[in-house]
Image (cartoon, grey):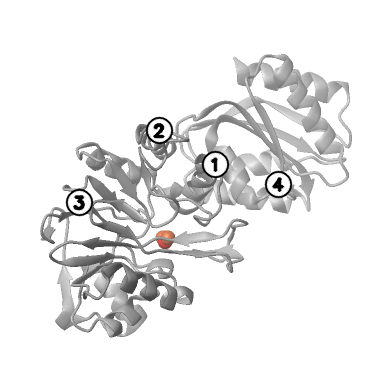
């Protein structure tokens, strides 16, 4: 597949993987992208997971068609991309590896060598001429690791964006971009909004016609002609996500329920939000739905309700885990409502409030719903107050 003049795709699809990073369910697999720039010099952009080394080397060999790659550009050292570097360096003993100083330090850790006699260390603003194509390197620390670099090919107007603008899912499966890109973003990069904002400022100064990420499809006008019309769609979403803004107006209600009474209360509350004109109400059972999907919904909407049972004198474990995910991912800038259930000594709201204290710029609604066993008139009145406060 040709991406642009002189740029070929040589990545692989992984349908064997069960959990990406040992954590994320990927029912449609994963793509590890790699590209080759064919010019007077040849640069291969990143390698792939070690389980696909031979397939990738075959793809590279087919793309270079008898020529020998001059450079392997390493944008990111996480093993889903660095796992085949050693095999490449053995297959092409005259090639030079191009990376940031931090990436070479990681090569020493992973491979026992930093290829000292075959390395080219680059940093922000450095350039590498391949002929007509010239790469300019863009530092992108913490998007997603500290060593990350991106590179911009001005001739082709292509940004090689490392993990940024990637998504879950192999490339031979058709699916909505935003859904799996959002789940990927908030799971993998969501904590580092500040760094992504800094990157977007740099990207805004470049004339970009196509983005080549390390996962997911190449984003460009032509490739996406049938779905989205321009790169602005993706850049706008990344701007909202990384600034912890509101992507969709509405409320997300995340709950756990032991015998169904908290679930019933949540259904009542959802109906009240809808009756009061809330544009969208999304309800998820944290124990039974994908946790990463719930995390992305928590970031997607500006308002969230957490509803759970008092358990062992504290917060029900699944809700505790969910809140830990939010805190870890820098959850902020949201309005939060609390619903607790407890048949004799309800304390879950207090416990959830304490867990959320680490988050900055969260507003917790004053109205709290306390269900004692099963929601009655008192709880219904508290729900009215909570919905009114959150929609005010
Ligand atoms: Fe796709 Fe951070 O590795």
Residue designated by label 1: 176
Cβ of disc 4 within 8 Å of ligand 1?
no
Residue designated by label 3: 153
Residue at the extreme front:
65
Residue 105 location (% of width, % of height): 26, 74
Q: Residue at x 62, y 20 (%)?
A: 279
Residue 313 location (% of width, % of height): 77, 50
Residue at mark 1 to residue at mark 4: CA–CA distance: 23 Å
On screen, residue 331 versus residue 163, left or right, reads right
User: Is tag 4's residue or tag 3's residue first in the polypeptide sequence?
Assistant: 3
Dot 4 alpha-carbon crowd within 10 angstroms: few under 14, some 14 to 19, many 20 or more: many
Residue designated by label 2: 233
Residue 137 location (% of width, % of height): 19, 55
User: Is tag 1's residue or tag 3's residue first in the polypeptide sequence?
Assistant: 3
Q: Which mark is residue 68?
A: none
Q: Quadrant of residue 386?
A: top right
User: Is tag 2's residue or tag 4's residue first in the polypeptide sequence?
Assistant: 2
Residue at mark 2 to residue at mark 1: CA–CA distance: 13 Å
Cβ of disc 3 within 8 Å of ligand 1?
no
Residue at mark 4 to residue at mark 3: CA–CA distance: 43 Å
- Of helix, strand and loop, which one carries label 3? strand
Residue designated by label 4: 286
- Asked whether the beta carbons under mark 2 and mark 3 sit within 8 Å of each other, the answer is no
Q: Nearer the viewer, mark 1 or mark 4?
A: 1
Residue at mark 2 to residue at mark 4: CA–CA distance: 30 Å
- Asked whether the beta carbons under mark 2 and mark 1 sit within 8 Å of each other, the answer is no
- Asked whether the beta carbons under mark 1 and mark 3 sit within 8 Å of each other, the answer is no
On screen, residue 319 versus residue 38, left or right, reads right
- Of helix, strand and loop, which one carries label 1? loop
């Amino acid at each position: 597949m040709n991406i642009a003049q002189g740029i070929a795709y040589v990545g692989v699809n992984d349908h064997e993987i069960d959990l990406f990073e040992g954590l994320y369910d990927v029912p449609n697999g994963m793509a590890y992208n790699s590209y080759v720039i064919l010019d007077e010099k040849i640069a291969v952009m990143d390698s792939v997971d070690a389980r696909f080394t031979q397939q990738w080397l075959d793809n590279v060999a087919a793309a270079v068609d008898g020529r020998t790659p001059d450079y392997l550009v390493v944008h990111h050292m996480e093993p889903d991309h660095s796992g085949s570097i050693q095999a490449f360096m053995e297959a092409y003993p005259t090639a030079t590896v191009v990376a940031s100083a931090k990436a070479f330090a990681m090569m020493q850790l992973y491979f026992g060598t930093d290829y000292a006699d075959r390395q080219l260390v680059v940093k922000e603003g450095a350039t590498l001429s391949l002929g007509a194509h010239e790469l300019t390197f863009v530092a992108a620390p913490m998007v997603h690791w500290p060593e990350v670099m991106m590179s911009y090919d001005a001739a082709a107007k292509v940004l090689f964006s490392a993990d940024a603008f990637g998504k879950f899912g192999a490339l031979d499966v058709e699916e909505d971009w935003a859904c799996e890109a959002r789940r990927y973003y908030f799971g993998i990069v969501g904590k580092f909004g500040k760094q992504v904002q800094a990157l977007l400022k740099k990207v805004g100064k470049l004339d970009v016609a196509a983005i080549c990420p390390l996962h997911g499809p190449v984003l460009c006008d032509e490739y996406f002609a049938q779905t989205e019309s321009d790169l602005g769609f993706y850049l706008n979403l990344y701007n909202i996500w990384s600034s912890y803004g509101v992507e969709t107006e509405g409320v997300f209600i995340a709950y756990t329920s032991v015998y169904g009474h908290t679930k019933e209360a949540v259904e009542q509350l959802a109906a009240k939000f809808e009756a009061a004109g809330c544009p969208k109400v999304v309800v998820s059972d944290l124990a039974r739905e994908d946790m990463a999907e719930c995390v992305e919904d928590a970031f997607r909407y500006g308002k969230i309700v957490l509803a759970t049972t008092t358990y062992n004198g504290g917060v029900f474990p699944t809700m505790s885990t969910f809140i830990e995910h939010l805190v870890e991912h820098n959850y902020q800038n949201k309005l939060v409502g609390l619903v607790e259930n407890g048949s004799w000594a309800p304390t879950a709201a207090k416990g959830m409030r304490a867990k959320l204290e680490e988050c900055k710029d969260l507003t917790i609604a004053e109205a709290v719903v306390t269900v004692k066993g099963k929601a009655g008139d008192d709880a219904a009145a508290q729900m009215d107050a909570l919905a009114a406060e959150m929609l005010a």
